[in-house]
């Protein structure tokens, strides 16, 4: 089961715990919950809330092979929130980190170019 991008939320967490999934499996569910909160906050211009939620997602998601694209996308989204608040140094750091995990993350590359144009 792949929860991070799923829509299972708390039900998924209960399912994961009930099935005796590993801590990594449970962490993916929590990462998914935080990521979705971050997306919602970003879409509603709650940039501080988005940064906090994406940071929680990164802290919850497994830092293991196979999750580079997931972590890269989360870093890119957090960078977008930083940029929206004018925290360009933090945004650049997140976009660079996203690209180091996934050099094919075109959104992070475009966001970085946009920031450097300021």
Image: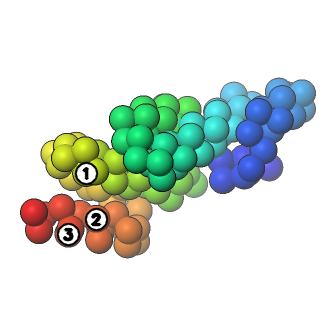
Q: Is residue 65 left or right of residue 89?
A: right
Residue 27 versus residue 103 in the image, above or below: above
Q: Are marks 2 and 3 in contact (CB under 8 Å)?
A: yes
Location of mark 2 (residue): 111
* Label 2 – label 3 distance at C-alpha: 5 Å
Residue 57 lies, in percent from the top left, at 52, 37
Can the viewer see residue 50? yes
Q: Secondary structure at mark 1?
A: helix
Mark 1: few/some/many CA within 10 Å (<14, 14-19, 20+): many
Q: Are marks 1 and 2 in contact (CB under 8 Å)?
A: yes
Q: How many discs appear?
A: 3
Disc ID at residue 83: 1
Residue drawn at (78%, 44%) of the image: 8
* Label 1 – label 3 distance at C-alpha: 12 Å
Hey, which quadrant is residue 25 in on the image?
A: top right
**Between 84 and 102, the one nearer to me in the picture:** 84
Q: Secondary structure at mark 3?
A: helix
Residue situated furthest left in the rendering: 118
């Amino acid at each position: 089961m792949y929860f991070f991008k799923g829509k299972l939320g708390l039900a998924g967490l209960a399912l994961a715990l009930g099935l005796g999934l590993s801590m990594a499996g449970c962490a993916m569910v929590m990462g998914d919950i935080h990521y979705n909160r971050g997306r919602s906050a970003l879409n509603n211009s709650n940039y501080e809330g988005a940064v906090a939620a994406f940071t929680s997602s990164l802290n919850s998601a497994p830092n293991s092979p196979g999750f580079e694209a997931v972590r890269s996308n989360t870093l890119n989204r957090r960078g977008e929130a930083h940029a929206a608040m004018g925290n360009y140094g933090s945004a650049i750091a997140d976009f660079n980190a996203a690209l180091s995990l996934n050099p094919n993350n075109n959104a992070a590359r475009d966001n970085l170019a946009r920031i450097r144009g300021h």
